[in-house]
Image (cartoon, grey):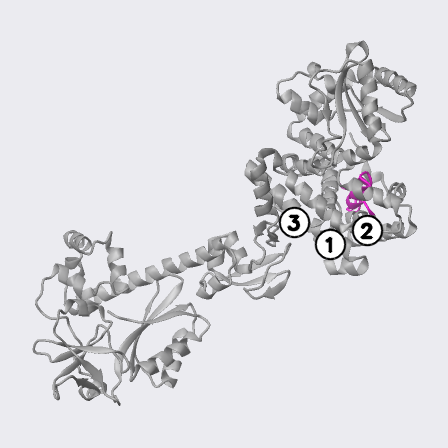
Amino acid sequence: MTKDYTKYTIDDLIEKVKVYIPNEENLKEIRHAFDYASLKHQGQFRKSGEAYIYHPLCTAIILTTVYADTDTICAGLLHDVIEDCDVTKQEIEEEFNSDIARLVDGVSKISKMHFSTENEALVEYYKKIIVGMSEDVRVIIIKLADRLHNMRTLWALPKEKQKIKAKEVLEILAPIAHHLGIHKIKSELEDLSLRYLKPDIFYDIAEKLNTTKLERDNSVSEMINEVSNILKEHNIKFDIKGRSKSIYSIYKKMEKGKKFSELYDLLALRILVDTEQDCYTTLGIIHSKFKPMPKRFKDYVAMPKVNGYQSLHTTIFGVDGQIFEVQIRTYAMDEIAENGVAAHWAYKEKKNLQERSQNSTEAKLQFFKSIMELDVEKMSSEEFVNSVKDEILNDNIYVFTPKGDIFELPHGSTPIDFAYKIHTAVGDTMVGAIVNNSIVSLDYELKNNDIVKIITNRNSTPSKEWLNIAKTTQAKNKIKNFFTKSEKEIYIERGKEFLEKELRKKKIAFQDFFNDQNIETIIKETKCTDMDEVYLSIGNNKFSALYIISLIIKQNEEPEVKQVVPIKRKNSEKDIIVDGIDKIKVNISNCCNPLPGDEIIGYISKNNGITVHRRLCPNLDRLEDRMINVKWSDNPKSKYLTSILISSRKNGNAMLEIMQKANTSNIAIDNIKTLSRTDLVIYEVDLWVNSLERLNNFIRDINQLSYIENIERVMK
């Protein structure tokens, strides 16, 4: 079906390039690229057995068929050196130029992509990404040439891989070739894909074509003579040739229910003329001699396709009544029809041999034109315009994992956005990022085609500071969800601890308290859905543990308060001034543990003096109206007990550092209890401290430790 391309040499490539790039400097550059690639690929072999250098050589040969420019030919020869030979983009730029380096790097990025053809949405997504990440349309041309040669040697792979590659080409790459207007590459890609996906059908059609070839050749030859004679009579300058129909296009028509014998367009002619006016003149001459088939005329000259294709199509009854499909176009239109966007720089090489052929403005226009064509057939005009605005022109970037998976992100995204795009678990355990083999900060702004490796630690958790760094709504929502879930679990654990602690103090057995009837009563009275919500309500101070107990065990006693027993608090009565009373027993409430500096209020208890609470204490709601104003003295002497909860990422030295900072702050630690229900470690720390100011300073010191997530005072 195709020539043995391993027989080609660099001299063959140069001869083909000379046809449209005769400039010696350009030819030297191409030889240099071949020599460089040969050196880098030395000792490497393909699955088909030949030396690896034959693959880039054949890729370059294919590129000459679409008149690729010098930089594109060089990039075709070098397109695998980054991926397979540990050569960097910078090395290629130093050895050649920045354009060639950029093209090679672009092809390497696409080659690392893992495609999936599981559903139509994925196929459309990958087509968009391939085009979207190719800032220069020549990257796609090289990739198509690279894949075409791979398809020609696909026989060397196992059958299962053959089918995967063929399906990928048929559903993703061939349509891109079509939208770029590169017919000759698109047609061969389709035929080769069909050969491996449905070999029985492929060879059946090929056999039918071979069987009828002699008859068809005779009919086409006779028709060419007839048409040539009438065009000469009218002094039209022209070229005429028979046009073969691809096996895949025949298969698609048969797939719609047509029989092979019913495919009248197997007989086809293509007529090339000088001018657009000659196209219409030729059409009129042919129609005057041969009867056209109704509803089979298409004018793509006056109304070109989006990919630039122009031609007149007509179907006529030719010699012996046989049906012929005829295409009429200018030589320039034929270049574009065969080579698509590649034809634009082909003409430039011919017209100005001293200049680089690629014009950046034109390349961008062609790039956007090809993107816009991708989904236009399935969209209304309004949907199409909105899609281009929202999805194409919004500066999206395309970022790789080291394995070649690719993700689309908005411009300005950070490694945090990328991590959460991969998976929530990757984002939640992220501790760092490496971009293009260099460690970067988490607020680093990712760029198009970056290769990003996320470093994770299963014991690590997000930081709330990430909410100010992340760009995408998805990442921000996942960070918020983590803290909502994490804090909820912490509050539930804390509420359970508080309730069990009160039950132990009152010597109430857990099994007696937590029976089905009691649980039902608690849930009903608190209007909670389950006991976890009850624990959550205790943990976040909506209810006190004493209140929950009182729902089950009716008691007339006052809420339990802490007696002034420790010697460190013997001066508490002097530290607190009771409004209008000189001498009275004063106790410090153990539910809110007020400190000098807190706003306080007194509660007159039965037979136990004044109990002092923080004004924010939730238990005051149940103590009715026996309140009395109290305040701290100007110079409190005692230390008072209070509790804080410290949320920390796991760190072996955390407890030691907390104790050291307490010591330097002149704060005594009475007790530390460790709670762990998530990836965070929660320390409940009981402290003796002489003022709110000193406690706040201590909390600020602890917060400066890198692994500390949150600190708060406890109210029970």
Q: Can residue 236 be seen in the rendering of this structure?
A: yes
Tag 1 secondary structure: helix
Q: Nearer the viewer, mark 2 or mark 1?
A: 1
Q: Is residue 53 left or right of residue 567?
A: right
- Relative to 45, residue 233 above or below: above
The residue that disc 2 covers is 38
Residue 465 horizontal side relative to residue 239, left or right:
left
Coordinates of residue 37 in the picture (x, y in percent): 80, 52
Report the Cα–Cα distance between label 1 and label 3.
12 Å
**Please, is residue 278 above or below residue 366 in the view?**
above
- Per the image, is 68 magenta? yes
**In the rendered structure, are the residues bearing label 2 and label 3 in contact, judged by CB atoms less than 8 Å apart?**
no
- Mark 2 or mark 3, whichever is nearer to me: 3
10 Å crowding of disc 1: few (<14), some (14-19), many (20+): some
**Position of residue 699 in the picture relative to residue 33 (left or right):** left
- SS for dot 3: helix
Residue 590: x, y in percent? 21, 75
Q: Which residue is mark 3?
A: 133
Does any portion of residue 117 appear in the rendered image?
no
Q: Is disc 2 surrounded by few (<14), some (14 to 19) or many (20+) residues within 10 Å?
A: many
Residue 598 located within the stretch drawn in magenta: no
In primary-sequence order, the first of circles 2 and 1 is 2
Q: Marks 2 and 1, how far apart in space?
A: 20 Å
Q: Amino acid at mark 2?
A: Ser
User: Pointer 1: what residue?
Assistant: 102
Q: Tell me the amino acid under the disc marked 3.
A: Met
Identify residue type, mark 1. Answer: Arg
Image quadrant in which you'd find residue 447: bottom right
Instruction: State yes or no: discs 1 and 3 in contact (Cβ < 8 Å).
Output: no
Quarter holding the N terminus is top right
Which portion, as a residue range, is magenta? 49-69
